[in-house]
Amino acid sequence: MTDHVDQKTRSWIMARVKSTNTSPEMAVRRALHAAGFRYRVHRDDLPGKPDLVFTKNKIAVFVHGCFWHGHRCDRFRMPSSNQEYWTRKIQRNVERDARTAQVLAEMGWERIVIWECQIQQGLEELLDRLRTSPS
């Protein structure tokens, strides 16, 4: 199946996809702030530029979109057009995520991923972890 918009329009649409301050990320940030936790956002001195960083606890939190990071859930659906491109793109993202996790672990950081489809569950697990973590 071919794309229903021309290449220029598709490029314009894709250029507007946000990588920071996304709706799922903002929901997690609001809930954590309301629970009394303070954090840093998008620290570019850490691998992967985590969405949230709890420096004292050495916890790096990533709020991943199911499509962009290849989460095999109901929200993930491979596009029907240009499948070769999208398969490679998502595979590179998954590989980069794995490298980031390894480097963070080598640095002594804990990496926590909250998936877009599991925000509430991931948030509860993160809150439990933060409450029991020595700071």
Image: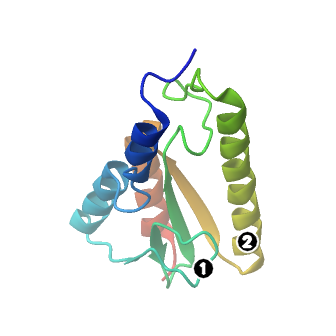
Q: Nearer the viewer, residue 44 or 30?
A: 44
- In the displayed orientation, state which residue is furthest to the left: 34
Q: Position of residue 72 (x, y in %)?
A: 62, 30
- In the displayed orientation, state which residue is furthest to the top: 1
What residue do we see at 67% from left, 28% from top? 83
Say which mark, if any, is on residue 98.
none
Q: Which residue is mark 2?
A: 105
Mark nearer the viewer, 2 or 1: 1
Q: Which residue is mark 1?
A: 46
Q: Quadrant of residue 99?
A: bottom right
Q: Earlier in the sequence, mark 2 or mark 1?
A: 1
Q: What amino acid is found at the position of numbered circle 2 in the picture?
A: Ala
Within 10 angstroms of label 1, few (less than 14), some, or many (20 or more) residues? some
Q: Quadrant of residue 88?
A: top right
Q: What amino acid is found at the position of numbered circle 1 in the picture?
A: Leu
Q: How many numbered marks appear?
A: 2
Q: Position of residue 78 (x, y in %)?
A: 60, 26
Relative to residue 83, is residue 23 depicted above or below?
below
Q: CA distance from mark 2 to mark 1?
A: 11 Å
Q: Position of residue 126 (x, y in %)?
A: 46, 58
What residue do we see at 27% from left, 58% from top? 31
Give the structural element (helix, strand or loop) at label 1: loop
